Amino acid sequence: KEINTFKPKIIFTHNSEDCNNDHRIISRSVNMATRPLILNNFLKTLISFEIISSTEWNFENQFSPNYFEKLTEKNVNDKIKSFYFYKSELHKSQMPRTSDGIKTLAKYRGKMISSKYAEAYKIIRTFED
């Protein structure tokens, strides 16, 4: 119902192989709600994203990105600032979900596309007119 009300052209959802069960349920729900058989003509792209210390901890089925967005230093710093609003998600220094972990992942994804920083996504499907 919300998808039909909002009429998005692009939907971003959690990775279906995420270790967090709530994230998996959301991903599955979005996939079901955007099936081609019931799809309206406004949605063009369905994309999944990774969440540090939740996505990469699935050692059996690793996140396999096929789309990257370059990030600036400011983008990464803004992402880190935003992260601090999620106080219950802050971890100790050796865990991935830290400011250093966020920056390290952005650097790693950047290296994959010969950039200083990047975010990785997986295009699940695209819909043509």
Image (cartoon, rainbow, N blue to C red):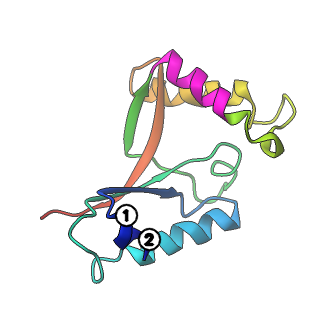
Examine the image and state in which quarter residue 78 appears. Answer: top right
Q: Residues within 10 Å of mark 2 (few under 14, many from 20)?
A: few
Whether 10 is drawn above or below 104: the answer is below
Q: Position of residue 54 (x, y in %)?
A: 69, 51
Asked which secondary structure carries label 1, the reply is helix
Return the residue at label 2.
2
User: Residue drawn 71% across and 45% down?
Assistant: 53
Residue farthest along the bottom direction in this orientation: 37
Name the amino acid type tagged 2. Answer: Glu
| Residue 107 in view of the camera | no
Q: Quadrant of the C terminus?
A: bottom left
| Residue 9 in view of the camera | yes
Any mark on residue 23, and which? Answer: none
Q: Position of residue 84 (x, y in %)?
A: 74, 33
Residue 10 lies in the magenta stretch: no
Whether 123 is drawn above or below 34: the answer is above
SS majority, magenta: helix
Name the amino acid type tagged 1. Answer: Phe
Return the residue at label 1.
6
Residue 76 lies in the magenta stretch: yes
Q: Position of residue 110 (x, y in %)?
A: 47, 25
Examine the image and state in which quarter residue 68 appears. Answer: top left
Q: Position of residue 115 (x, y in %)?
A: 41, 20
Q: Which residues are magenta?
A: 72-82
Contact, CB < 8 Å: mark 2 with mark 1? yes
